[in-house]
Amino acid sequence: MSITVEKISHRYADHIVLQDVSFAVDYGEIVCILGPSGGGKSTLLRLLAGLEPIQQGQLVLNGDLLADSNQNPAPNERPVGLVFQDHILFPHLTVFENVAFGLGGMEASRRREVVNQALADMGMLDLGERYPHTLSGGQQQRVALVRALATQPSIMLLDEPFASVDTPLRRRLREEARQSLRAAKTATLMVTHDPEEALAMADKILVLDQGEIVQYGTPLELWQNPSSRFVGETLANRQTLIGEVTVNSVMTPMGDIPLERVRHLGSPDIGASIAIGIRGSTIRLSPGKGPVIQDNRCTGAWHMISLLADAHHLSIPVANSEQDDLLDTLTVGMSVQLDFTSADAVAYDRSSPY
């Protein structure tokens, strides 16, 4: 049971928005689509929803063709639920009536039972007679989600659904949404610009950049083995260093990284230039000859030491509780030496976008 996207390509005039995109989402699975602006995320959702005609490729639901370039059912003819950033609730209808809107084929008594149960599951039963303008942004978003789930769609499409609410409420909403979506056993695709949100919500993350799939896998897979600089810097808490391969190390402006500390390096030629994603928390520093401290600031449990060497930047977190004596000596303008013997570094695929 799944929705399969097969070789979808799309363009606006001469601008290619999506190119040969293929993946599948199983029922009960939440896939977050992440990528830079203009990468094709929202266009992909619009194609799935039927808001844009498919130019090339096809959508397959449980082995049956749902849409292609010759067959494009309207949104209301697809088993799809939609939730957008701006909620799009009907202002002249109550909360109850908004949720009941898509259940017109049910008997009145059954419809009332389904709506009340859906509202109760989200803790909103007491809001049934209110109108959207009397609700907070978070309440409106809950209603939009309940309304979309009430029709028991095979596919749920969410486009930046929590972007308009503040951070603490966003965290609560996405946890509620994740539990509701998994309980409904629907296949879910959610567009987001927030890497924290993607990691918190997703069973899998699909990274789109320049219309192509850069990487598709579980949050753990992307965290441990990012294939591109965008994935490494956005999702995996890595910083990028450009270095030159030598016999025993990768030589960077910040120091030499032993080859054995760089995963997925392959067999590059001596002298080759490569991009490396490295975690600052796995690097040790001490006073010595090397990069210069630009800044030293407290970020809570950590001090963030910002370094500069030959126009290259690197930030190293130092725990307050671990190196109190060291922190006292790290002043702006002094030079430090970096120890990479325990570094967690990964070589990026230079052929992938960004």
Image (cartoon, helix red, strand yellow):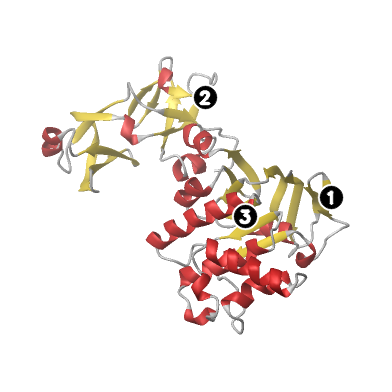
Give the quadrant of residue 90.
bottom right
Circle 3/circle 1 CB separation < 8 Å? no
Q: Nearer the viewer, residue 298 or 196?
A: 196
Quadrant for the N terminus in the image:
top right
Give the quadrant of residue 115.
bottom right
Circle 3/circle 2 CB separation < 8 Å? no
- Circle 1 sits on which residue? 65
Q: Percent from the top left, x then y, of residue 160?
A: 54, 61
The dot on residue 41 is 3
Report, in whole angstroms, how far the alpha carbon at label 1 lies from the one at label 2: 39 Å
Q: 10 Å neighbourhood of mark 2: few (<14), some, or many (≥20)? A: some
Relative to 79, residue 289 above or below:
above
Helix, strand or loop status at disc 1:
strand
Q: Nearer the viewer, residue 352 or 318?
A: 318
Helix, strand or loop status at disc 3:
helix
Q: 10 Å neighbourhood of mark 1: few (<14), some, or many (≥20)? A: few
Report, in whole angstroms, how far the alpha carbon at label 3 lies from the one at label 2: 28 Å
Left or right for 4, reference 290: right
Report the number of discs. 3
